[in-house]
Amino acid sequence: MRLRVWAPSAKKVELQLKSERIRMAKVDNDYWELDSPDLEAGSDYFFVLDGQKPFPDPRSAFQPSGVHGPSRIIDHSAFEWHDRGWNAPVLSSGVIYELHVGTFTAPGTFDAVIERLGHLLELGITHVELMPVAEFSGNRGWGYDGVDLFAPHHAYGGPDGLKRLVDACHRRGLAIILDVVYNHFGPEGNYLPQFGPYLTSRYATPWGSAVNFDDRGSDEVRRFVCDNAKMWLHDYHFDGLRIDAIHSIVDTSAIQILEQLSAEVAELEKSLGRSLVLIAESDLNDPRIVRHSELGGYNIQAQWSDDFHHALHSVLTRETSGYYGDFGLIKDIADALQRVFVYDGRYSKFRARRHGRKPTGLSGHSFLGYLQNHDQIGNRAPGERSSNLMSIGLLQVAAALVLTAPFIPMLFQGEEWGAASPFIYFTGHENRELGQAVSEGRKKELMAAGWKLEDIPDPQAIDSFTRSKLDWHELEREPHKSILRWHQDLIRLRKSRVDLYDGDLAKVHVEYDEQARWLLMTRGSIHVACNFVSEPRRIGWSRKPKAELLLKSNPAVQLETDYVDLSGESVAIIAT
């Protein structure tokens, strides 16, 4: 078996296999190579640069002992797949479910997720999205501190566990998407700079040095990232990737890294004969991300839409601190539903500048809409969910808007039953000094944002992790059973009505009353009437054909010929 490693500055590279060090040969493009009969699946090894301490392989397929331990060779062809002929459901008609492997179940493993796939199918989910699973320091964390990008986390079940999960999803008819992080590397166990210029000092990110996509030596760094993406899609059979925080990727190249990545994934899609998708997280409000490359875009299939979330959350909670200070009006929800970006070139008080650009001509299906995600929950000091911040009535209103909006809807684990467990920011760094620095940094950051010290959990505390695990016993109790049934009914309705899976934003019409605090969204023959206050509201119709009440969140909601009577904090979905 042959091993290769890129190490342009090294004078000598050796492979450490058990106690033996074997010299490697330098080949083209500053790679070092070794072909040895002693290398086989299951072999553990390190690379040694210039006689110094041994390091894991930058492209390690498995780190069974964590980020500081040896790399292990994996034979991807040895796994028996059962998904021949599989092709994912079309993303535009999908319902996405974001989950964190470590907290989705009590065991916190890939195999334990498999045991809950039946729940997702009953809910009506089409696409599962895993938060990052690349090897990070310790046994617990969100996954955004990954350092071994080719290695599924050992605590979750490693490569075979992940393959079993993907295979099980496909056998049950579920597509599966993986969250990947290409804007930075984690702080512990990141040995990439020892091998080559993976980082650049030209730019910085909120998490440290930026990844080198346009400086000296960047060709191989770009190759590293594109190969990583294609590895997840090819060797692990993922149906797509969600690319984290692309606004923190700086690349001044003529062909930006995301454009290169999308082009290479498109070629892989052709060779595999099955559809693959890329989804970007971005707070740039820049439609170029999802435009075709011929139009100057990156050709990413969809991006997260934070403006819709911020508009909805701020109206339902009345929160106006931080970035929510740019929102708070029902008009903002109306603008988001009809135009995607509330800030599409408008002045933003929070940013003290103009922000965004109009997404002219784009489909709503180029954007994801959501009430909750890992960031919007976990970036709050106590990690409270919407179920801790809103009444049941308002939770139902929010769910109705998310699941009838012209966007691709996404739910965060447990949202569908109003889970009471928080989702706290937690880490498990093995380095004590780093762990203390993370804890202190978290306190300073959140206190500067106005949170009280006593409300800020220690991310390194095991309790912050265990409290974030879902309590599946809640499904046996009210109001969780009713909230789940409401989500199931909404998803079933979305899938059964053509007007609800049409992404044409020109067909979305919204009326609202800022003072009376009601909103009426019309999508073809479907009308969604929302009352955001505890007092009853009557909403008159601008159209008066025969109407049918499809769903209502409160028995007191009444439909008449030319108006609908809404009880406090309720929603009605009507067909005409």
Image (cartoon, rainbow, N blue to C red):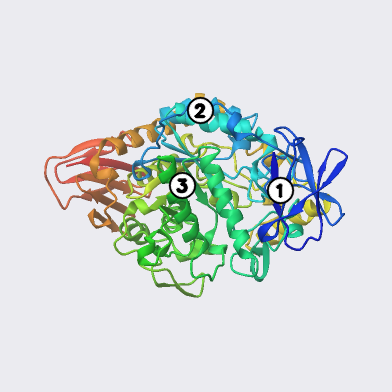
Total marks shown come to 3
Query: Closer to the camera, 242 or 72?
Result: 72
Residue type, numbered disc 3: Leu
Numbered label attached to residue 168: 2
Could you tell which of marks 1 and 3 lies nearer the N-terminus? 3
Query: Closer to the camera, 39 or 274?
Result: 39
Residue type, numbered disc 2: Ala
Foreground disc of the pair 1, 3: 3
Callout 2–callout 1 Cβ contact below 8 Å: no
Numbered label attached to residue 170: none
Q: Residue 384, percent across and down?
A: 57, 46
Callout 3–callout 2 Cβ contact below 8 Å: no
Q: Which residue is mark 1?
A: 459
Q: Is residue 528 left or right of residue 258?
A: left
Query: Closer to the camera, 238 or 128?
Result: 238
Q: Quadrant of the C terminus?
A: top left
Q: Residue 201, percent across and down?
A: 69, 70
Q: Which residue is mark 3?
A: 268
Packing grade of label 3 (10 A; few <14, some 14-19, many >=20) is: some
Q: Residue 415, percent across and down?
A: 49, 39
Query: Closer to the camera, 55 or 514?
Result: 55
Callout 1–callout 3 Cβ contact below 8 Å: no
Q: Is residue 567 visible?
A: no
Q: Residue at x 20, y 48 (%)?
A: 524
Could you tell which of marks 3 and 2 lies nearer the N-terminus? 2
Foreground disc of the pair 3, 2: 3
Packing grade of label 1 (10 A; few <14, some 14-19, many >=20) is: many
